[in-house]
Amino acid sequence: MKISSERVRWVAYAITIITGLLLTIMSCKKDNHDHADHNEDVLEKYNEHVPAEAMQELQQAKTATQKYRSLNAAIADGYVDINVTTQNMGFHYMKPAYADTVFDPQKPEILVYNKQHNGDTMLVAVEYAVPIPLMPAKAPAGFAGGADVWTYSTEFNLWLLHAWVWEYNPLGVFIPTNPNVHLH
């Protein structure tokens, strides 16, 4: 399935607008977060709030994206910069070939990165994106147990789902914004 550059631009535009709206709704509290714990298993912090089966799927997502901790590896594998940079999220890279109606925890359409103070990039989240025209009636099937939070926008025809598998989000693993992520 070939995805046109127009479709990539459309998805990037939709993500920008949706995240902007979400940021105006949610407070942008500043947190003294030490990124030194980025390598620890952040998924353990979500155990209490996420069903066991969903935790297994989140672990699958994390394992599958381990190789993309290097931004260069993600780019080499077909992820492209969609020029969406959002405070409390990061820099978004999309793999257009994955844009369809199939939810696969191991194949996120979007990878979200942040830059550390030293300039190195760090993978912080995975994101799933499904064009609404392909799934118009209801949110796509997602993580088991119903704890995931799909964002629906008829205006932009896009379903979005974040999963903070690499950087702990005190608001929740599936909440779109993360107060621990600050653009540098």
Image: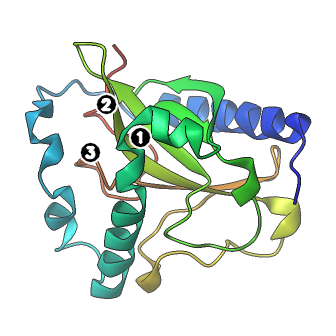
**Going 86% across and 35% down the picture, which residue do you hit?**
5
In the rendered view of the protein, which quadrant contains the N terminus? Answer: bottom right
Residue 8 at x, y = what percent? 79, 38
Label 1 environment density (alpha carbons within 10 Å; few <14, some 14–19, many ≥20): many
Foreground disc of the pair 3, 1: 3
Give how far apart the Cα atoms at labels 1 and 2 are: 8 Å
Asked if the residue under mark 2 is in contact with the one under mark 1, i.e. CB atoms within 8 Å, the reply is: yes
Asked if residue 152 shows in the view, the reply is no
**Secondary structure under badge 1?**
loop
Residue at image mark 3 = 167
Label 3 environment density (alpha carbons within 10 Å; few <14, some 14–19, many ≥20): many
Viewed as shown, does residue 183 lie left or right of 142?
left
Residue 147 at x, y = what percent? 41, 74
Q: Quadrant of residue 160?
A: bottom right
Residue at image mark 1 = 177
Residue 174 at x, y = what percent? 41, 58
Q: Disc 3 marks which amino acid? A: Glu
Residue at image mark 2 = 181
